[in-house]
Structure formats: structure tokens, C-alpha cells
Image: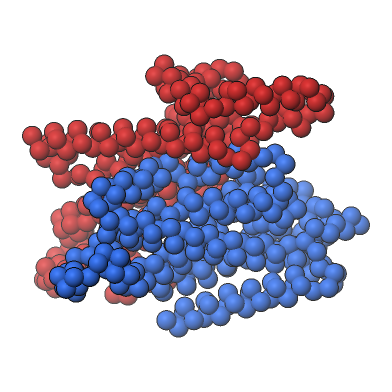
Amino acid sequence: MRSKFAANCLLAALALAAIIVVAMPGASYSHQDRESTFASASKAHPAGTDALGRDRLVRVSAALLLSLTGAAAASALTTAAAAGVGVVAAFGPESIGWIAILTCDVFLAPPWMFLLMIVRSALPLSASPMSSAVVTFVVLAALGWPACARAVHKGALNLKTSDWMLHAQAAGLRPTQLVRTAVPNLLPVLLPQFLISIPAFVIAEANLGAIGLGIGEPLPSWGGMLLELDNSAMLFETRWVYFPIALLIIVLLLLEAVAMEA
Amino acid sequence: MKVAGDVVRWLARTLAIVLLVIVGSTVLVRFAPGYLSDAREMDSRYGDAVRAELSVEAARSGTLTHLLSAELQGWMRGDGGVSREYGVPVSELIVPRLAVTGELTLRAIVMAWSLALLASLFSSAARRPSLLWQAPAALLLAVPTAALATLCLLAGKGGPVLVMALLLSARDFKFLHYALRKAWSDPHLLQARAQGVKAHRLVLGFILPSIRPQLSALASLSIVTALSALVPVEVIFNVPGLGQLAWNAALNRDLPVLLSATIIMALAVTLAGLASDHPGEWRSA
């Protein structure tokens, strides 16, 4: 419990620091300082600059905020969809439940990465960076719900066969009333699913970006910054290129710690 | 008789899932917002009239029924259709790469299982969970595949097998540690330990047999995780496997290749589920 509190505090501190950096006057993730490309840490650029002379600290801060917001929103969508499907499958007619679980299996059959690639490859060529970011996280949410729905379905089935639920049925509660009573009791299943999905989506976005199918430039993203590491000429210029990867691992460790405690 | 019925039911379900994956992937592709865009539209050498012609042609050949029938016909013929990028049957591109991917995945899984089993046996036998084993596993779980692959490449140490094995072993370790820890605390094992039965005899005679169902489930999970990690690993290490082919197809909008690769992966994942679905029935059959 103490480690969850510490992880939450550290995450909040990181997010706050990122907001301050991004909101500072003159800070821009896309501004190019062509006089100082590949620069190491300096007063003007505390974490150096990238190949186009863009401030790395501002870009990392923006990527942190974008990834946390996007992953949390996608996770909320996933959890809501999973709750809906899981509850309907458990409390609805048997045929509906069978179809819902078969749909989950169909979605779970191909590995995520392949489905993500299919959808990302079919985006318009002229898609703006922001729409590529929105599409990336929406697609993650759209593909992430089946595993979560299976867990919710199992929890809902356990609830359905519990003594108090049988008693409620015997007492004449209508199916809608039963569902309304059951959903709050599924929170212990839904909350961990929500928290587990956040780091999973952050990792998926980073992996997708690292192979060039993630969020479009100049919008900063973890995946985009991993691509920077391909530029080996830059690595000899400054070790600060490792800063985004180090911060990404710290953020993921904190997110995992929060999820583990839930 | 019951086993035969189970097998038929399982086969029917697998076939239904694969067919639905084909239909679902095709629908996904057809209704994706940029399906009708063509890279040639960005080429300044083409005039407006040619671009309009390209759009009309794309719309004509891009109906859902046309796409679905082309995909299914390709699979019926056994060649998976024709690659848009290379103009050759998809099977010619996929078959040589399947061997590369299969070998990489198999070697990674064997290495990962050896690492995870060894680490979890040591960690679970201790009185308390030790940071020595838990910390590296937690760290590896927090590193995206692409990041680990890039770091290995830059450091000049380790290759695709090691990267995949490390990622898989961290996940496997997490499950094995809990399963083994639970097994070690069974009353009959505590009694045997108190009576001085050697640890290796307990592991081979009691612990491993008792966690066999979890091991079969973990085997299918390992395959799914390995297949998900394939694309970044093969792309970053330039391994000519199925993952790299799919990535290349995604970048070049070669949808017949991408769909075929996805269907093969779906088939592999569904078959991997076989181990965890009915281990008892298959054994007794």
C-alpha cells in the first residue's frame, strides 16, 4: 500500500513537472534551433537537442503528457467496453453470451501488433499528427477490450451465481435491476483492469512508434524518440539521447507498481 | 467418443475463428479511413487526370465483396493472393520467411523457459521473495521490446533471440514464481522437506507434475507473447522473417501480404491455445 502511494506521488510529480516544462514561456516541442543540433545539455536546453535542434526536455515532457493522457483515455474506453460486453455476456441470454465470448476470441486470435499495423497502414497519407495520435490510442482501446471483457465476464458469472444474487432473483428483481446491482460489485475487477491497461498501452504506443507506425512528427511520442536512437551519429555527440528511454522505463515501472498494488 | 467429439468441436471453433479473423481483418482494412488512398497520389509526376483515374480504379476494386472473395480465393488456391508491391503470389514471400520466424521463436521460447524455470525454482524455494530475482524481472517487464532491441543493437551485445528470450522469461518468471511458491507451501511438501527429502527429488517428483496445467497454459501464453514481440525485434535487427515482411507490407500498403501474415499469426495463436484448452483429453487420447 505504501509503495502504491509512493508510486502515485512520483507519477503525479513527474506529470506536474512535465506540465510546468511544457507551459513555460517560449517552450515549444516543434521549434527548431538549427544553430544547435545534436547539442548536449546546456542552460538553454537542459537535456540537449535532437537532430533538428528541438529541445529534448520539452519534447520528452510533452511525450509524457500525451502518452499518459492517451493511454488513460484508451484504458477508460477499454474498461467501459469490457464492462458492457462482460456484463451482457454474463447476464444476457446464453446465445448472446456465446457470441460475445466468440467475438472476444476472434479479437484475441491475431497478435495486437499485426492488427495495429493493419489499421495504421490504412490511415490517410495526409493524416495530421494529432489525428494519428488520436487514431493510435483509439485503435489501442478498440483492440484492448477482449482480454479485459473475458475477466469481467468471469467476475460477472461468479456474481450471478452468488447466494445473494440468487436471493435477489428469487425475490423478483428484474434483469435490469440485477445488472444495476451487480455492476458496482464488479469494481474490484474493473479497477485493476483499468490500471493494467495503462502501461500496456504506453508500451504498445512506444513499440508502434519505434517501427515508424505510431504518432506522426512533429508531435513528440516515446516511439518517435526511440527512433532517434537509430541515428548512431547522434549517439557519439551526446549521451542525452538516452534520456527519453530512461524516463520511459521509470514511468512504466511506476505505472506497473500502481497496477500491481490494485 | 467424448474425446472425438471434443476434437471435432475444437476444430470447428478454430475454423470459425480463423474465418472470422479473415472477414474481420478485411472489413477493418476496407473501412479504415485511408483505404482508398494510394501512395502514387503523392507523386508529382502524375497529373490530375491520372490521379482521378487511380481513385476510380481503387473504388471499383475496393468493394468489400470483391476484397473478401479475392482473399478467400487466394487462400483456396493456396497462394494467399498476389502481393501488390512485388506482384508475386503471397505464399512465395511468406514460406521462406516462416522458417526464419519459426526458428527465432522456438529458440527464444526454449531459452526463456530455461531462464525462467531456473530463476523461479531458486526464488520460490527461498523463505521470502528476493529482490535479486524480482527486480530484474520487474525491470524487463517495464522495457518496451523496441527499446530493449535498440539498446542491444547499440551496445553490440545480444541478438534477436536474446531480446525475445529476456522479455519472455520476465513474463514467464512472474507466473512460474507464483505457481511454484504456492506448490512449495503445500502441506505434504512441507512435511517431505521437514523429513529431509532432497529438493531436486521434490521438484521432479511432486512440484513439476503438480503445476503441469499451469505450465501448458503458460506455453500458449509464451507463444502469443513471442509472436507479438516479433515485429519490433525483426525490424530492428533486420531479420528476414514474417514480422519484417508484415511491417514492410504495412509501410507499402501491401494489404494481401499483411492480411495473410495476420491470418497465419491468428492460426498460430489459436493452435497454441490447444495446449491449454484440453491437455487432459489430448493426453488420454
> Which residue, as the protein is rendered here, is positioned at the far left?
B1
Please determine whether, in this image, residue B169 is positioned above or below residue A176: above
The x, y position of residue B284, in whole percent, is 11, 40
Residue B31, image quadrant:
top right
Residue B187, image quadrant:
bottom left
Please determine whether, in this image, residue A11 is positioned above or below residue B150: below
Chain A color in figure:
blue
Chain B color in figure:
red
Q: Could you say which is closer to the camera, residue B163 or residue B217? A: B217
The x, y position of residue B118, in whole percent, is 33, 56
Question: Seen in the image, is A99 located left or right of residue A1?
Answer: left
- Scheme by which the image is coloured: by chain
Q: Could you say which is closer to the camera, residue B247 or residue A116? A: A116
Q: Residue at x 17, y 38 (%)?
A: B6
The x, y position of residue B73, in whole percent, is 43, 19
Please determine whether, in this image, residue B244 is positioned above or below residue A40: above
Q: Could you say which is closer to the camera, residue A143 or residue B132? A: A143
Please determine whether, in this image, residue A193 is positioned above or below residue B104: below
Q: Is residue A146 visible?
A: yes
Q: Residue at x 33, y 70 (%)?
A: A180
Q: Residue at x 62, y 27 (%)?
A: B59
**How many dots with numbers?**
0
Q: Which part of the image, by quadrant, shows the N terminus of chain B?
A: top left
Question: Seen in the image, is B266 located left or right of residue A120?
Answer: left
The x, y position of residue A115, in whole percent, is 50, 42
Q: Which part of the image, by quadrant, shows the C terminus of chain B?
A: top left
Q: Residue at x 25, y 33 (%)?
A: B11
Q: Is residue B265 visible?
A: no
